[in-house]
Image: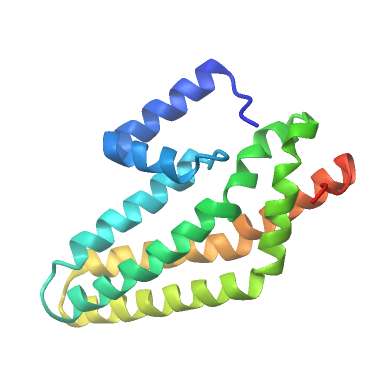
Amino acid sequence: MRPKSSSRAALLALTTAAWMGVSGLALAQTASEAHEIPQSQTAEHADNLVHLAALAKHPGEVGAIAARAVALFKQHDAREAEYIMPPLSLLPYLADGKITPDMQWAVVMADRVKADRELIFTEHTKMIEVLNELQFAGQKAHDEEAVDFAKSAAVDALNDVEILEPMAVVIGDILRAKLGSPAH
């Protein structure tokens, strides 16, 4: 389902294009072919990968740790694009009380989030561990860019665990209550 007002869609597209650049926008569109992903999340993930890739070019331990982090972030971002973030695109419609049968797809995704919560938590734990390593290495190397990024990205990962992923599950529960269980 892709209901949106043209002015909201235009604003989001312009914001995302400015933030990510044209190639990043094309990548985000490819990653979410089946269902939308909130553009703020797409932009945040793209920005994190850009920063990590730049940090991976730093000398010594900072670069080595950042390179390890890139792989972890890419793996988790792919999972989020596949089934964690798309249900979140329905939040504005749910807030307006607009629930339609063509939103049923989100119930299946939310159920998968619920089933995979332990795996998702483990991924976030690994991401936060490598970010802690990056912060420590940045402190030792007096690399403020690495320290600042590591702190910020760790907060983003915690936000995913505390708010975004549980919200995907809640969205599924709300839709199930209003629409019934999806046919498999």
Left or right, residue 78 beside residue 136: right
Report the residue that reaches farthest toward the left. 59
Up-down relation of residue 36 to residue 78 (above or below): above
Q: Considering the image in quadrants, where does the N terminus appear? A: top right
Residue 68 position in % (x across, y down): 30, 75
| Residue at 79%, 51% in the rendered image | 184
Left or right, residue 30 beside residue 59: right
Q: How is the image coloured?
A: rainbow
Residue 32 position in % (x across, y down): 50, 43
Q: As rendered, which of 46 and 157 lies closer to the eye?
A: 46
* Residue 16, quarter of picture: top left
Report the residue that reaches farthest toward the top. 6
| Residue at 26%, 77% in the rendered image | 65
Residue 10 position in % (x across, y down): 45, 21
| Residue at 63%, 25% in the rendered image | 3
User: Tag count in the figure?
Assistant: 0
Q: As rendered, which of 129 and 108 lies closer to the eye?
A: 108
Q: As rendered, which of 95 and 107 lies closer to the eye?
A: 107
Up-down relation of residue 26 to residue 13 (above or below): below
| Residue at 55%, 60% in the rendered image | 160
Q: As rendered, which of 44 and 182 lies closer to the eye?
A: 182
Residue 79 position in % (x across, y down): 52, 60
Left or right, residue 126 beside residue 122: left
Report the residue that reaches farthest toward the front. 184
